[in-house]
Amino acid sequence: MRKLKFHEQKLLKRHNFLEYKREGGHREALVTQRYRLVERDDYKKYNGICLMVQKLVNIIKQMDPRDPFRIQMTDLILDKLYNMGVISTKESLLKCEKLSVSAFCRSLPPSPSSSPP
């Protein structure tokens, strides 16, 4: 292999090959390892669900607090997420606003590989 030129060495010093911007740090790898997710697509799907719930909550929060439709939708969202085991209490939309992939992974039953023999 040839010796690198000066400007090539400078470029390599500035670039981090272990962490990419689109990965968002190593959060994905940590969650996948901690909750023993089998595929990377599982993390992406849970992340997409979290984003959809957060968008829905933002839309609902922009509505008038006394609007009966807002009250009904708030109750439906809180009931659904509470029954799934994603949120611990049905207090307010603040719980749904801070939803994470880890919350979905915690609500899943443990994988067969994690149980003792």
Image (cartoon, grey):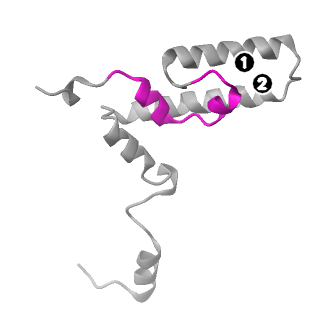
Q: Secondary structure at mark 1?
A: helix
Which residue was labeled with disc 1?
A: 74
Q: Quadrant of residue 91?
A: top right
**Residue 76, position in %: x, y?**
67, 12
Q: On residue 86, which mark appears?
A: none
Chain part drawn in magenta: 89-109
**Residue 74, position in %: x, y?**
72, 18
Query: Considering only vertical position in the picture, is 70 above or below 25?
Result: above
Query: Considering only vertical position in the picture, is 27 above or below 50?
Result: below
As drawn, which residue projects farthest toward the left? 117
- N-terminal of the two: label 1 or label 2? 2
Q: Secondary structure at mark 2?
A: helix
Query: Considering only vertical position in the picture, is 6 above or below 102?
Result: below
Q: Distance between the Cα atoms at labels 1 and 2?
A: 8 Å
What's the residue type where badge 1 is placed? Thr
- Quadrant where the N terminus sits is bottom left
Q: Is residue 91 magenta?
A: yes
Which residue was labeled with disc 2?
A: 60
Closer to us: 3 or 112 = 112
